[in-house]
Image: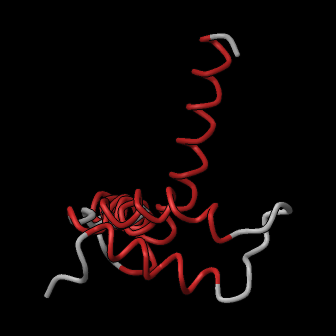
């Protein structure tokens, strides 16, 4: 898209926005600037609300357990990748033991 096309598109969007905001402003009796500010604020708020929440930091114990589980899991799996009988339970128990037990 060339710069001229971008400018033309921006102008069209401004005209469209004005054609929507001015009748709304006249119906509500509010100044057009206030209506425009409200619309811009709501869209900004919607964008902020759509952002993903910040993830929590993993504790040191969780990181140790994760690495221990990845090390011991293959011992409790079959050749095709499925868990052996009670394999998952035993892998979890061993990983907790290696990581230092559950901390309170």
Residue 37 quadrant: bottom left
Left or right? Give the position of 79 relative to 12: right
Residue 28 quadrant: bottom left
Which residue is depicted at the point 56% across and 61% down?
20
Placement of the N terminus among the 4 image quadrants? top right
**Relative to 13, does residue 76 appear above or below in the rendering?**
below
x and y percent of residue 54 in the render?
31, 63
x and y percent of residue 81 in the render?
78, 64
Placement of the C terminus among the 4 image quadrants? bottom left
Residue 4 quadrant: top right
Left or right? Give the position of 80 relative to 50: right
Comparing 66 with 4, the one in front is 66
x and y percent of residue 79 in the render?
82, 61
User: What is the total number of numbered labels drawn onto the structure image?
Assistant: 0
The furthest residue to the left: 104
Which residue is depicted at the point 58% across and 65% down?
73
Which residue is depicted at the point 47% across and 65% down?
69
């Amino acid at each position: 898209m060339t710069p001229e096309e971008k400018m033309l598109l921006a102008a069209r969007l401004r005209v469209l926005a004005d054609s929507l905001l001015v009748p709304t402003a006249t119906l509500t009796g509010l100044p057009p600037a206030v209506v425009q500010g409200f619309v811009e604020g709501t869209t900004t708020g919607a964008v902020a609300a759509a952002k993903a929440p910040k993830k929590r930091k993993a504790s040191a114990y969780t990181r140790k357990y994760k690495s221990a589980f990845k090390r011991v899991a293959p011992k409790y799996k079959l050749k095709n990748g499925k868990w052996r009988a009670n394999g998952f339970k035993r892998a979890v128990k061993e990983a907790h033991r290696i990581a230092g037990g559950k901390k309170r």
